[in-house]
Amino acid sequence: MRSIFIYLWQTTESTVATALDAAYSRAPRADLEWIQSINEDPYLYISFYHDGPAETGDWDTRFAAHGGPPSVSVVADISGRHEGWPQTREFVVCVLSRFNGIAEDDNAERFWSREEIEADTVIEGRKFGSWRNPR
């Protein structure tokens, strides 16, 4: 499964959950998880991401240019049954239009702004969404 991460500052999980509730369906049997579906076929599985500090040894320093670690982190897993780019772009743009933040794909080479993702900008030969880039 492919994943993208969104890191947000100056907000809370409660505020982000309210925004996600307004835009996406709650996942069945899940407390704080959402699904983005088309005709009841899931494309994105969305949840809060709490594993960053444990998975990334430099978590406290990697966000130094943003004033420190994010207040809230969100992950969206893209279904392997779909290419998923339109839904991913829509999701990231939606969240980053409401909150101060940045996004990262599985490749984790750089952080991406809402404007870069919305415009499908190519930077150093890459687009946001590591699965979309030729190897």
Image (cartoon, grey):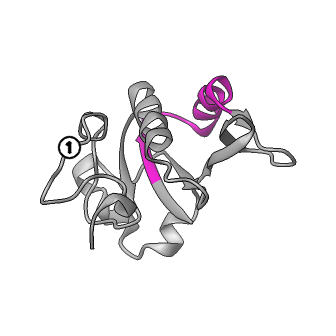
| Nearer to the camera, 84 or 33 | 84
Residue occupying the point 40% across, 33% down: 93
Give x and y (percent) for residue 82.
Answer: 56, 53
Count of numbered badges drawn on the protein = 1
Q: Quadrant of residue 59?
A: bottom left
In the foreground, 117 or 12: 117
Q: Secondary structure at mark 1?
A: loop
Q: In the image, is 86 to the left or to the right of 49? A: left
Up/down of 79 relative to 15, above or below: below
Membership of 12 in magenta stretch: yes
Pick the quarter of the image with the C terminus.
Answer: bottom left
Relative depth, front residue between 37 and 17: 37
Q: Is residue 132 magenta?
A: no
Query: Quick one: 4 or 67, which is closer to the camera?
Result: 4
Q: Quadrant of residue 79?
A: bottom right
The residue to which callout 1 is attached is: 121
Q: Position of residue 16 (x, y in %)?
A: 58, 33
Residue beneath the point at 71% across and 34% down = 39
* Image side of residue 93 versus residue 123, left or right: right
Q: Amino acid at mark 1?
A: Thr
Residue at the (44%, 25%) spot, across then down = 98
Residue in view at x 61 percent, y 58 percent: 81
What stretch of residues is rendered in magenta? Answer: 5-24
Residue 102: image x %, image y %? 34, 44
